[in-house]
Amino acid sequence: DTAVSQTPKYLVTQMGNDKSIKCEQNLGHDTMYWYKQDSKKFLKIMFSYNNKELIINETVPNRFSPKSPDKAHLNLHINSLELGDSAVYFCASSRRWTGGAFQETQYFGPGTRLLVL
Amino acid sequence: RKEVEQDPGPFNVPEGATVAFNCTYSNSASQSFFWYRQDCRKEPKLLMSVYSSGNEDGRFTAQLNRASQYISLLIRDSKLSDSATYLCVASRSNDYKLSFGAGTTVTVRA
């Protein structure tokens, strides 16, 4: 059984469009994350939810809006897509958010490869 | 200065060789360290957690040097299947979120 799943795996779209990526985890974890991995391979945290509450909101354009309908799901909606949004977006989950120096292991989904033309 | 810095490599080694590489982290108060492995066009997968001075898991040994703020990963008896990018991870200074290095690429040749 897939632990962390994302849909779609590939997304090719035109500039200016609005698109959503969905993520689901069946690990019973409390905390979920969205990361962006650009062409230089850096994984950068974008958002995190703990039990449906937003706990991490990095300096991300407000065209990006996460939504967590329940603790097993975290979706990412992107408005007015731009060329620079092309990247691989990874969802991840961890057992809990400690809010302290010790952090739990994160488990990643397969990624969504977004290409904006 | 980046939170986590790694030598990008690539490290090209023959099968059976030992390969080792380091990463440095900027937050002296970091308590959580991980090595993840990422295959081409795949997601990062946890290889090892490093919580004390270091640990060993089969052919993989991780060492943590808090005084010099670096973590090392050593792979013994390299296999072709060890070819991947290895991501070093440490918790961030201001908010303890995980910060990922850009990765060290290892290629094991037959």
Image (spheres, coloured by chain):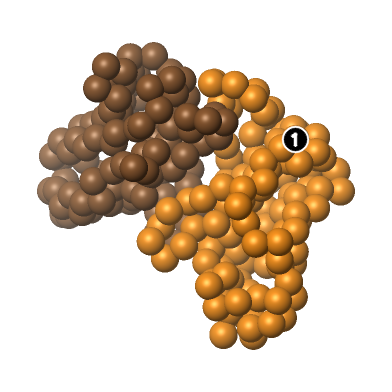
Chain colours: A orange, B brown
Q: Is residue B97 visible?
A: yes
Q: Is residue A3 visible?
A: no
Residue occupying the far top of the picture = B52
At x 25%, y 51%, the residue is B8
Q: Quadrant of residue A29?
A: top right
- State the quadrant of the C terminus of chain B: bottom left
**In this rendering, position of residue A112 left or right of residue B2:** right
Q: Chain of mark 1?
A: A
**In this rendering, position of residue B38 left or right of residue B8:** right
At x 55%, y 78%, the residue is A83
**In this rendering, position of residue A51 left or right of residue B91:** right
Residue A53: horizontal and vertical position, in percent?
A: 80, 38
- State the quadrant of the N terminus of chain B: top left
* Mark 1: secondary structure: strand
At x 48%, y 51%, the residue is A43
Is A86 placed above or below A88 here?
Answer: below
**In this rendering, position of residue B30 left or right of residue A46:** left
Residue occupying the far right of the picture = A69
* Residue ID for mark 1: A50
Q: Quadrant of residue A78?
A: bottom right
Is A96 placed above or below A68 here?
Answer: above
Residue B69: horizontal and vertical position, in percent?
A: 30, 25
